[in-house]
Image (cartoon, helix red, strand yellow):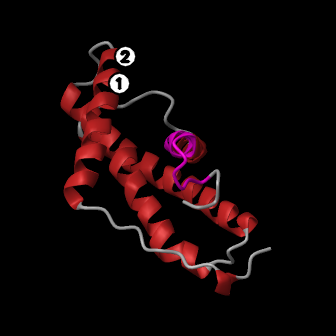
Amino acid sequence: MTPVSSVTWHSFKEPLRVTLARTLTIAVVVGVVFAWLSRGNIGLPVAILLALWPSLGGHVVEVFFLNQIRPRLSAARLPQMTARIGLWFLAGVVLLLCMRLTAALAGFHPPGWSAWWVGGIAFIGIELVPHLFLQLRGRPSFYNGRG
């Protein structure tokens, strides 16, 4: 087990334009697919807005973990992984509730969004995908404990 004092975590910093370009692109692509799959039940602007919650929200959650939570935990893998997955679950629940509220305000009432825990499990899955791509590229990620 690695002692906390031997690990130096660096704050995550990224230019706002890079963050917005990536998260907006993801939201547009997912929104287009979501609007298309809904067969006209939801408009493209609302679909993009809904997709922006996990896209931009996911980025905010990751930065919060990396800069605020991770440095306060033991550097051992188990506490790091447990805290991150727990945060992803809680964030997923909150983001789903935000998406439901946004959808309701837009006049869209999607069926099957009543189970709050689905948001937590789905968000964990959503977060594991980009970390897999980071891992495959040899970059710091959840899987290698460096990201």
Work out which residue is located at the far top of the displayed protein and give it. 39
Q: Quadrant of residue 69?
A: bottom right
Pointer 2 local density, CA inside 10 Å: few below 14, some 14–19, many at least 20: few
Image height of 93 relative to 12, above or below:
above
Q: Are circles 1 and 2 on residues that touch, CB within 8 Å? A: yes
Is 90 contained in the magenta span?
no
The quarter of the image holding the N terminus is bottom right
| Residue at the spot of label 2 | 37
Image height of 133 relative to 73, above or below:
above
User: On the rendered structure, is 13 left or right of 66?
Assistant: left
Residue at image x 39%, y 42%?
Answer: 100
Q: Amino acid at mark 2?
A: Leu
The quarter of the image holding the C terminus is bottom right
Cα separation, mark 1 vs mark 2, equals 5 Å
Q: Amino acid at mark 1?
A: Phe
Residue at image x 25%, y 52%?
Answer: 18
